[in-house]
Amino acid sequence: MTATAERQDQDPSESTMTTPRPRPSFPLPIGLLAVALAACGGGTNPSSGGGGADVLSLMRARGLSEADVTAALKTYTPSGKHDEYLTFASGGHGGNLIVIGVPSMRIVKYIGVFTPEPWQGYAYGDDATERVLDGGNRFGKRVEWGDMHHPALSETKGDYDGQYIFVGDKANARVAVVSLKDFMTRQLVTSSLIQSDHGAAFVTPDTDYVIETSQYPAPLGGGYAPIEEFNEKYRGAAIFWRFDRQRGLIDTAKSFAIELPPYMQDLADAGKLVSDGWAFMNSVNAERSYGGNLEGRPALEAGASQGDMDYLHCINWRLAESLVKAGKTRTIGDMTVLPLEVAASEGVLFFVPEPKSPHGVDITPDGKDIVVGGKLDTHATVYSFEKIKALAEAKQFAGKDPYGVPILDFKASIRGQCEIGLGPLHTQFDDQGFAYTSVFIESVIAKWSLKDLKVVHKLPMHYNVGHICAAEGDTVSPDGGYLLGMNKWAMDRFTPVGPLLPQNFQLIDVNGAGEMQLLYDMPIPLGEPHYAQMIKADKLKTIEYYSPVGSNPITHEKDPEATLAKQERVERRADGVHVWMTAVRSHFTPDTIRVKEGETVHLHITSVEQAHDATHGFALGSYDINLSLEPGRHSNVRFVADRAGVFPFYCTEFCSALHLEMAGYLLVEPKS
Ligand code: CUK
Ligand code: CUA
């Protein structure tokens, strides 16, 4: 029975909190559809009794086709019902994560990650989150944006476990850890080793490591070398950040990197099941072109696309880990590095040629195959892990690259190729043995059978589709059902908003063995999101308030400066004026703060609330301070009162009828 038919006889009063995923196969004929709508109480005029006619006239009036209405029925989520999935989409250089419900495509939250986020009190004076952001400082300098590309949900045995999500910042070579207990960023890490990344973040099947691979080769450690010494002095690297799940933090001391030749390493993916212990990343620019188009050399992109083949990097990270433990490393900058010559000679690193300008690399759910899309190719190439491993173990090499890295024979390493179309990029998987590949130049998604490598359907996408994201699509057991196409630029699609175009996410019903169906267009008002991951919503176990009262939102432990009711006080100490303050509906105590111009002020503010609907804020204009005081959360703020005057502070959440009155004054008395 199709889900649409199920809907027909479903009593609306029996609705569950989670809407069952509709998997209808064919649009209903209009008459039947209207009857179905009427039976569901979907008539537009409740007094008419004949809802069907109203639905039909509504469809005509709005110019909606049967397919439109079917799509609407598959995405519409009535008030009070929750979505079955949450998608965590990169917010691109906005530096935020965007959390989107599926199938409704309602945005549920933004999470400040690389960019300060005032509503969440993320790095607007709050000491704990300022320190998180400072963890990502580059060469001592605060960077307040990031070019976020790839979110990776934490996994247990290759399945999303709903505990953490990691993201990479391409521009500043950083990786962030976000806790899904409270949707807060708790750590940023970076290494001076590399100067940009792209293969980030990708996790190993038990989240032992978060992978971050450099993109643009540079001297390792952040030093200088003339660009003419590119081949000798410039390098790539793959960092394996060790994740300590107990602490919920990356352990930088236990992390290591593998030095790589100066090709532009691109995306990465970790092996799973049979290929667990291995990681794969592709590269472009085997030519080692480095630009110089005003100095008589070919432009970078022209030089980088001369050859026919680039190199898929196959890395035995478990072997690398044991070589690191055996001390076969060098320290470069702040990172423990397994040198290229060791990786090449000890069986850690192998190359397999891959067709022109590869981009996506995605491991199939069974871990057996590695699918690579070539931007300037028409195929998805399907490599066989078994074949690669056998060739590597037999030391059957077709050659070596200039750095001594063994190269395996292309034909002997692949299971086959699927003729996809112009510009295949990224591949996702469902539960029925199908793969889905975005085809950038052709602007379609190709659905193809993993078994016989044949395309079964192509669905036109709106414009320049990049990544696609399937329900639980990177796990060992994808769900099928939904697929998200992430289009670059919402050309002609929405009401014009000036030259800078939003992006367009398109939700697709991938529909078992049948044809894909477009369900929904969603403008994304931030650029440029690259990738997203979609998780079953019931896997997330979020908290409703911080406990105990006075918790630090990063450590979830009681802050030493936490203040309870009746303990509020002001003290002058050698390092300045300390104010221990509480926030509770609808006042701050104290609500008058008196300091002298030039004094350092330390605010220690505790929300003593323990109810989910009792969030307060603390805004102090002109001093650039904005805190979010969720129930139980504690914040420490330090600033110099360097401007005399009268500065109101107030609560920024409409927390009660007397919210506007939840305010006070900072009185900064002039020195003279
Ligand atoms: S990349 Cu943007 S569409 Cu950074 Cu994964 Cu392919
Ligand atoms: Cu507290 Cu508004």
Image: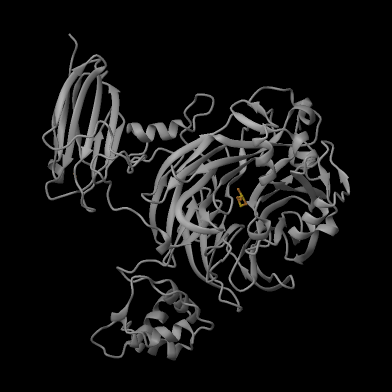
When asked about the image quadrant of residue 58, the answer is bottom left
Count of numbered tags: 0
- Vertically, is 89 above or below 214? below
Q: Is residue 251 left or right of residue 305?
A: left
Q: How is the image coloured?
A: one colour
Q: Is residue 41 visible?
A: yes
Residue 326 location in percent, x, y? 68, 34
The residue located at (31%, 38%) in the rendering is 552
The residue located at (53%, 83%) in the rendering is 26
Residue 275 location in percent, x, y? 68, 56
From the image, which quarter does the C terminus lie in?
A: top left
- Vertically, is 448 above or below 7? above
Name the one closer to the observer, 1 or 284: 1
Residue lying at the far top of the rendered structure: 672
Q: Is residue 91 visible?
A: no
Residue 467 location in percent, x, y? 59, 56
Name the one closer to the observer, 73 or 59: 73
Name the one closer to the observer, 623 or 532: 532
Residue 47 location in percent, x, y? 23, 86
Q: Is residue 400 left or right of residue 432?
A: right
The residue located at (48%, 50%) in the rendering is 165
